[in-house]
Image (spheres, rainbow, N blue to C red):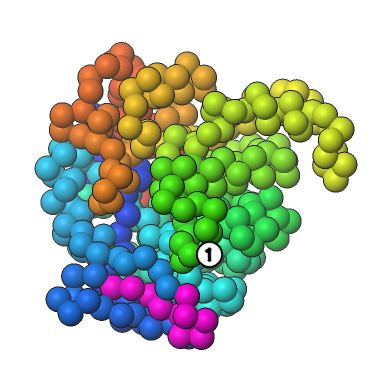
Amino acid sequence: MPEPSPSMKIDVHSHLMPSAVFGHPPRDFRSKWSPDRASVVLEDEVSERRGRPAKGDLLDASAIVARQKEQQVDLSIVGGWVDAMAAPTNAESQSDWCRLISSELATAVERQASLRWLASLPDLDGGLAAEELGVAARAGAVGGILATSFMNGGLGRADLEPLWANAERLGLPIMIHPGVYDPSETPIAGELLIPVFYPYLTTRAAVEMIRAGVPDRYPDLKVVLVHAGGFLPYQFGRVEHWLATDRVPTVPKQSPSTTSSALSWFYYDTVVHSRKVVEFLIDLVGSSQLLAGSDCPFAMSDWSLIGANGDDYLGSSDRAAILGANAERIFPLHRGTTS
């Protein structure tokens, strides 16, 4: 694999679900392919739950690389599709499913020098997630991707402590990403699942982590919030005030600085489709906390900063940091494996 360099453009937020994954669906699930085999749906054989279709470039590493070249991106970090990762409701079944996804990602990326991959982490059991991160790290993962787990107690759960500890020990960033297996299970989202509900889930997960004191206990842990942190950067003052009051009897009263300092503990991708929001984030947390991303290959992909025709509105130092240097600093991109 080529060595990253400071001049590289690195996309930290892309997705890949190799088609081979669906040849071995989770226990009690079946993969239903379209007649032309262009898309596939995971169906729960027990409860008749049904996911959204995986299709097109999401299934093909070479297609991701083609898009990467088209947009003049040098290196992409790919993670599994969180919607599908969240399908199993049994912790052991989900762990097995995530391990399969990670294994197929490792195989696909091995053949593509311009890709790196994230471990698919089960969100139902923190101990199993910690174990999966270790297994994937030895196989070459440069970090992990974790669902927001909003239907399973959230990311402030005590059982996730082994995951945070292991990620910090290994020096592997964890990307927090929203996902819903069956949209019918979240009717409140309606047609606004992608533009509104997903950023809400990211915001909720981040606040749960702050509320649980994760940034305080794991200061060297690197956590990446996708979609520019959801609504957190805009609403952090409200959250801060809420946590500082006596209105939450189960949570010890925290100092007003807790949420503010946590803002600069998180990292944020730039998948927000707005120059003004990126500039706002730089002003709020500094360019050192921003990572260029695209959300390729989905329809909501954002190439406005990192793409071939990306806006050249950043100063040279901010641009160098966000487009590649920050990713090099926090992800182990130079090595194939870690112990």
Relative side of 314 to 198, left or right: left
Q: Please check the rendered image and state whether residue 322 is part of the magenta-colored stretch, yes or no.
A: no
x%, y% of residue 277?
Answer: 41, 24
Magenta span: 40-49
Residue 163, relative to residue 241: is it above or below? below
Residue 273 shows in the view? yes
Which residue shows up at 73% across the image and 56% down it? 158
x%, y% of residue 166?
Answer: 60, 55
The residue wearing badge 1 is 185
Label 1 crowding class (10 Å Cα cut-off): few <14, some 14-19, many 20+? few
Residue 163 shows in the view? no
Which residue shows up at 16% across the image and 48% down it? 67
Q: Nearer the viewer, residue 289 or 336?
A: 289
Q: Nearer the viewer, residue 242 or 155?
A: 242
Residue 103, relative to residue 112: is it above or below? below
Looking at the image, the residue that sits furthest to the top is 315
x%, y% of residue 154?
Answer: 64, 54
Local SS, label 1: helix
